[in-house]
Amino acid sequence: MSTRPLLLLDVDGPLNPFRAPFLRHRGYVTRRLRPANWSARQRPGSRRLRRGLKVRLHPGHGARLLTLPYELAWATTWQHQANEMIAPVIGLPGDLPVIEWPELFGRDPEGLYWKTRHVLAWAAGRPFVWVDDMVTDLDVRHVAAHHDAAALLLPVDARKGLRERDFAELERWALSL
C-alpha cells in the first residue's frame, strides 16, 4: 500500500468545465463521448444520443496531476469509463483505481452530497484530497468529524475547471502533511 495521500478526481467540473458558456480556455480540446451513465438517461435514437456528450478536456492535465505527490483515483460517475475515455485524452494511465458507487445520485438523509459517505468509506482512513465541483461546507464538516486522517475537499468551479491555483493548492497541501 502506498504511503502517499489519495487524490480523488471527479471528471465533470474539475476536468471537464461543462458549465463554461463559451469555453475559450487555452489548450482544451472538445470530444463527443457516450458514457454509459449519460447514454442511459437519453431518449433512444435521439439526436442528442447520436451526437454524444460534449466533453472539454485539457491534454496537459494528466502530466500535471502525475507530478503531484499523490496516488490518483477516480471519484466520478464515469466510473471505469474514466480510464477508457478520459485518461487517454488528458494523459493519465488507463488503470487508475475507481470508486464504484452503489447508487448514482441518491439522496442522503442528512443532506450530504451523495458521494461523500462513499468517498470516506473508500479512503478507509488514509489522507486524501477530493476534487469535485459539488462539495459543500456540510460535506467538509462531515469529513472533518468522521475521518481520522487529514482530508481536503477542494471545490472546483465547473465553469473554469482545474486552474493553476488549484494545482498549487494540491501541491501545498500534500507537502504540508
Image (tube, rainbow, N blue to C red):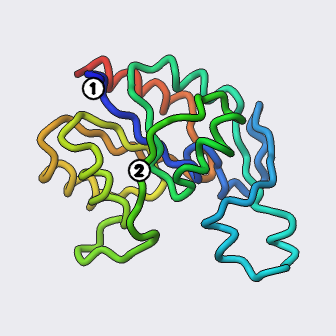
In the structure shown, which secondary structural element does the residue marked by tag 1 occupy?
A: loop
Q: Residue at x 26, y 61 (%)?
A: 138
Q: Is residue 166 left or right of residue 163?
A: left
Position of the N terminus by quadrant: top left
Q: Amino acid at mark 1?
A: Met
Position of the C terminus by quadrant: top left
Please tell me which of labels 2 and 1 falls first in the chain. 1
Where, by quadrant of the figure, is residue 115 drawn?
A: bottom left
Q: Is residue 120 left or right of residue 37?
A: left
Q: Residue at x 31, y 57 (%)?
A: 118
**Residue 137's disc number:** none
State the image coordinates of residue 55 (x, y, percent, origin top left): 73, 51
State the image coordinates of residue 23 (x, y, percent, origin top left): 76, 48
| Residue where numbered disc 1 is placed | 1
**Residue 99's disc number:** 2
State the image coordinates of residue 57 (x, y, percent, origin top left): 70, 41
